[in-house]
Amino acid sequence: MADLLIKNIGELTTPEGKCQKNGSDQGEVKVLKNTCVGVNNGLICYVGDEKNAPITERIIDAEGCLVTPGLVDAHTHLVFGGWRQHELQLKLEGASYLDILKSGGGILSTVQNTRSASKDELLQKSMKLIETMMAHGTTTCEAKSGYGLSTETELKQLEVIDELKKTTKMDITSTFMGAHAIPNEYKENRAGYIKLLCENMLPEVSKSGLAEFCDIFCETAVFTVEESKIILNEAKKHGFKLKIHGDEIDPIGGAELAAEVGAVSAEHLIQASDAGIKAMAKSGTIAVLLPATSFYLDKPYARARKMLEEGLAVAVATDFNPGSSPNLNLQFPMNLACLKYKLTPKEALMAVTLNAAAAINRADVAGTIEVGKQADIVLWDAPDLNYLFYRYGNNQAKTVIKKGETVWGN
Ligand code: IZC
Ligand code: ZN
C-alpha cells in the first residue's frame, strides 16, 4: 500500500546512496524512464514500473516531466533582522565587501538589526523566506546563527531556527556561528571575544542542544587561521561538527585548516590553494561552493573542476544572506555551477542533492529518490535534466513534495 503515487514521469534523475560522491563519481546520477514513485507515511516505498506499482487513492500525474530529489541548500544565513539594500550604492561607488565590514557596516549592521528584533519578528520573517525556498524546490536546508555575537542573542537566533523546525515543513540543520565577526564592543579586545566564545558561548550553546555544527568566518580582517583553529578545536571538544568559511576573498589557508581540524565541510574556497584542496581530499572534507556569491561580489569562481580532479566531493548552495547573496533560489547557483564551474548537469545535480545533504549530515534521509528515504521530490517544468540547467532566471519548480505532502504547486 502507498498513500501517494507519482506516475507518468518523463525522466527520474537521482543519485543513489547515503554518503557523498567524490571526484569522478560526482556525476554518478541515475536516469530512469517510465518510472513511478510510491510514497507511504512520508517515505518513499516504491520506485519502479507502473505495472507493479502499489495501489493508492492519491495520484500525481507528472505529465512526462523531469523529477528529481528535493533540493538541499547546505549553506544559508537564514535568520536576521533588516536587509542591506543601502550597500548596493556603496558597492557601485567602489566599496568592497570587506571595506564595508571594516567601516562597521556589513555583518555588523545586520547584527544591530538582529539584536533589536524580537524573536517573533525574526520567526515571522524567516517563515516567509522558507516558503520562498520551498517554492523553488528546496526541501532541506542549513541555517546559521552569527548575527547576535553575544551568548544571549546567538541563542535567540538558534531558538528561532528551532521554532522554524517545528512550525514549517522544512528540515533544517542548525549551525552556531558566533565567530562570524568581532562585535563592536570587542573591537579593541579581540582576545576578549575569543575568550567569550570559548568559555561561555560554546558551552552554553552546546548545553542548549540547539546547534549541530559550529562554523567560523576565517578571513582577512575577520578571524585569522590561528584564532579559527583555537575556536574550532574548542567547538570539537563540546561535540560540534565543524564547518569553515575559508579562502573566500584571500588565500590564507582556510582549506588546509578545514582538513587539519577534520571539518565536515569547507565553504567558498574561491582562493583555496592546491595544497589545501589536496589536504581536503585526504580528510574527506566536502567543498561547499557558493557561486551566487562570486556573482554578487564580482569575484572569481572556485576551481570546482580542479577539486573534482583531486577527488573532492562538491556541493553547491545559495549562501543566502543579506549582504553577499540575497537570493533564496537555489536554481540560480545551479545554473552558475554549469556555466562557471563547468560542472555537467549531473555533477551539478549531485552538488545540490546528495553531496549537499552529506555536507549537513542528512545524507541518510535526504538527497536521493530511493526506497526508505524521505519523500522529498520536485516535479519540474522541464522534460529532462539538460533543460533544467539550460533555462535560467525563472522558477522551474512545478510541484514540490516534502515528506509526501505537496508544499508548492499542484
Ligand atoms: O551578512 O555578510 N560572508 N558572512 C560571510 C556573510 C557573507 C554574511 C553577511
Ligand atoms: Zn556564508
Image (cartoon, helix red, strand yellow):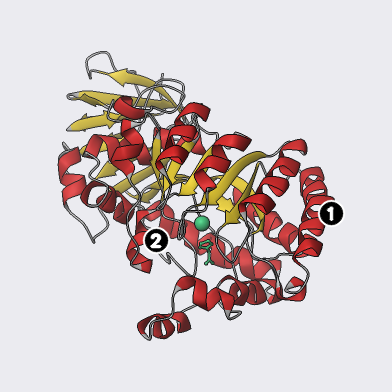
Residue 301 visible at all: yes
- The answer to which image quadrant residue 6 occupies is top left
Q: How many marks?
A: 2
Q: Is residue 35 left or right of residue 273?
A: left
Please state the horizontal and vertical placement of residue 43, each as a whole percent of the image: 46, 27
- The residue shown at (36%, 45%) is 400
Q: CA distance from mark 1 to mark 2?
A: 32 Å
Q: Please tell me which residue is depicted at 35% across the width and 55% down the height of the picture.
A: 291
Is residue 69 visible in the rendered image? The answer is no
Disc sitting over residue 200 in the figure: 1
Q: Residues within 10 Å of mark 1 (few under 14, many from 20)?
A: few
Residue projecting furthest to the right: 199
| Sequence-first tag of 1 and 2 | 1
Task: Please tell me how crowded label 2 is: few (under 14), some (14-19), or many (20+) other residues with Cα within 10 Å.
Answer: many
Residue 139: give x, y in percent of width and height: 44, 44
Between 168 and 126, the one nearer to me in the picture: 126
Q: Amino acid at mark 1?
A: Asn
CB at mark 1 closer than 8 A to ligand 1? no
Q: At numbered mark 2, what does the secondary structure look like: helix, strand or loop?
A: helix
Residue at x-position 77% and y-position 39%: 238
Q: Name, please, the residue furthest toward the top.
A: 52
Q: Is residue 369 left or right of residue 76?
A: left
Q: Secondary structure at mark 1?
A: helix
Can you tell which mark lies on residue 59? Answer: none
Q: Which residue is mark 2?
A: 293
Is the CB of mark 2 within 8 Å of ligand 1? yes
Quadrant in the picture for the N terminus: top left
Q: Name the residue nearer the viewer: 319 or 260.
A: 260
Give percent across and percent down for residue 141.
Answer: 50, 47
Mark 1 in CB contact with mark 2 (< 8 angstroms): no
Work out whether 30 lies above or below 298.
above
Q: Nearer the viewer, residue 167 or 146?
A: 146
